[in-house]
Amino acid sequence: MPVVIVENDTSQWEDETGSVYHFPKRYKAWLVEGTEVIYYKGRITDRAFAPKRLSPSPHYFGKARIGKVYPDPKSGKGDLFAFIEDFAAFESAVPAKLDGQYLESVPSSRVTNYWRDGVRPIAKTDYDTILSHAKLLPVQPPVSATATDDENLGLESFVEGSKTTYFSTRYERRKDLRIKAIAFHGLDCKACGFDFEQAYGEHGKGFVHVHHVVPISKLGGEQVVNPETDLVTLCANCHAMVHRARDVTLGIAELKKLIRGRWVSET
Ligand SMILES: [Zn+2]
Ligand SMILES: [Zn+2]
């Protein structure tokens, strides 16, 4: 059954629309891999968010599909998160109500509380109705290891050359992959445990390098990157160390064996 996911302008989770969705376990049965998703926003409550929305009124703004679902390691309450696949934004808002009629069929038993849930299953016919009013922006193609772009997102960007250390933007680094890699692997270094927010406070929040476990140059072909198995999060030091030898990329297990304790400030 398709679902509507309600995206609030402010949320306890720092989710990126169209990449990752965190949710409480009560929605687990509805958000399974392959589920079709429509994104929805309720009435605007804070005008500051107006430029980020397609409309101040309740509306639908995109479609997607649920990818793999994982337990949220940071949650003590059994929360989960899903990778979001094939997100396609609507070119303009599809209003929740057209000609005085809701596009979703609201069960008569739920008239008073229907709109309050963060996730609601809808009938396939309602899903089709909503989409019939939507004009989709083009879907981004799956990320391949050989694609390129020049977004500087800190995803596998560290390349050490003989004369210069530089940030390469030669290979595809889509933001989506970075968000998924961080959702799965966390923001701490998977070799030494370093955490930028712990060390640098607010200034370091959200910072981490994302490293391709298999060197991109060896991947060849149009291989799609799997954030779970192909990527890992590393601190800047460990990332530099796995790439220190020009021809060989160290594995994370190999690097871990080399680590001889961390320098700790005396102050
Ligand atoms: Zn590290
Ligand atoms: Zn790397």
Image (cartoon, rainbow, N blue to C red):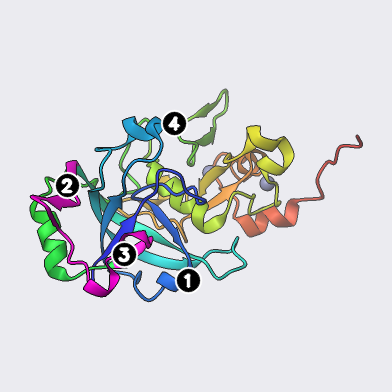
Quadrant placement of the C terminus: top right
4 vs 1, front mark? 1
**Amino acid marked by disc 2:** Val
**Amino acid marked by disc 1:** Lys
Of pointers 4 and 1, the one earlier in the residue sequence:
1
Identify which residue, 21 or 40, lies in the foreground: 40
Q: Which residue is mark 1?
A: 25
Q: CA distance from mark 3 to mark 4?
A: 47 Å
Of pointers 4 and 2, the one earlier in the residue sequence:
2
1 vs 2, front mark? 2
Q: CA distance from mark 4 to mark 2?
A: 33 Å
Q: Which residue is mark 2?
A: 94
Give the left or right position of residue 89, taking residue 261 as reference: left
Quadrant placement of the N terminus: bottom left
Mark identifier at residue 112: 3
Mark 4 close to ligand 2, CB under 8 Å = no
Residue 213 visible in the shown view: no
3 vs 4, front mark? 3
Identify which residue, 74 or 68, lies in the foreground: 74
Residue 167 visible in the shown view: yes
**For the residue carrying disc 2, how many other residues have a C-alpha within 10 Å: few (<14), some (14-19), or many (20+)?**
many
Give me the residue at 58% from left, 39% from top. Answer: 207
Identify which residue, 261 or 70, lies in the foreground: 70
Q: Which residue is mark 4?
A: 152
The picture places residue 124, in percent across and down from the top left corner, at: 15, 69
Q: CA distance from mark 3 to mark 1?
A: 23 Å
The span picked out in magenta is: 91-120
